[in-house]
Amino acid sequence: MKRFSPLLIVVVVILGILFLRPRWYLNLTKNVEVSPASGATLVDKYNCRQCHQIEGRGALKAPSLDGVVARLDGATLRLWLESPRKVKANTAMPNFYLSDSEIDAIIEYLITLKEE
Ligand code: HEC
């Protein structure tokens, strides 16, 4: 039987990681400071306002995120950011493949927003 070349195995593993983006890989490559300010920067970076209203600005294609922490429990909020389809299978909210620190920072920012 012909053996797989070690190089081929390495290439397949790397492509698999880039495609599946496991949590440890996200945490390794996207490690951010956990603060409301860095959360606000991430909300701009990932363009959440394309769908959500945040601090009164943004589109109305999705629920406003002002006061969202009062509506959702912590675990559900985190799951929305981690993997939206795990909360709602047919949701239009994309998975941004956020790292744990990015999620923590966005949550710290969302906590500062009061319902308009
Ligand atoms: C392409 C549009 C789109 C973008 C971009 C988007 N979302 Fe969403 N999001 C949605 C939709 C639609 C829902 C409502 C889901 C549903 O009910 O199907 C949602 C739901 C949520 C919820 C739960 C809200 C609630 O009241 O239940 C949170 C939290 C959230 N999004 C955060 C974010 C954050 C943070 C970003 C940026 C990183 C973001 N979203 C980017 C479309 C989007």
Image (tube, rainbow, N blue to C red):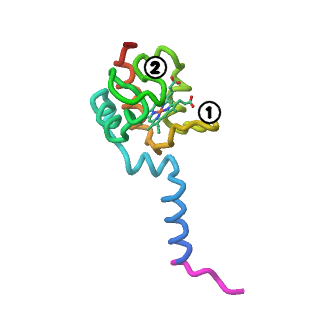
Identify the image quadrant of residue 34. Answer: top left
How many residues crowd around disc 2 within 10 Å: few (fewer than 14), some, or many (20 or more)?
some
Residue 1 vertical position relative to residue 6 in the rendered view, above or below: below
The residue identified by callout 2 is 68
Q: Nearer the viewer, residue 43 or 74?
A: 43
In the picture, measured across the screen, residue 93 lies left or right of residue 57, that is right
Q: Which mark is drawn over residue 70?
A: none
Which amino acid does the dot numbered 2 rest on? Val
Q: Position of residue 71 (x, y in %)?
A: 51, 16
Could you tell me how far apart the alpha carbons at marks 1 and 2 are, in whole angstroms? 17 Å
Main SS type for the magenta part?
loop
Residue at the extreme right of the image, as rendered:
1
Highlighted range, magenta: 1-7
Q: Position of residue 5 (x, y in %)?
A: 57, 81
How many residues crowd around disc 1 within 10 Å: few (fewer than 14), some, or many (20 or more)?
few
Residue at the extreme bottom of the image, as rendered:
2
Q: Nearer the viewer, residue 96 or 107?
A: 96
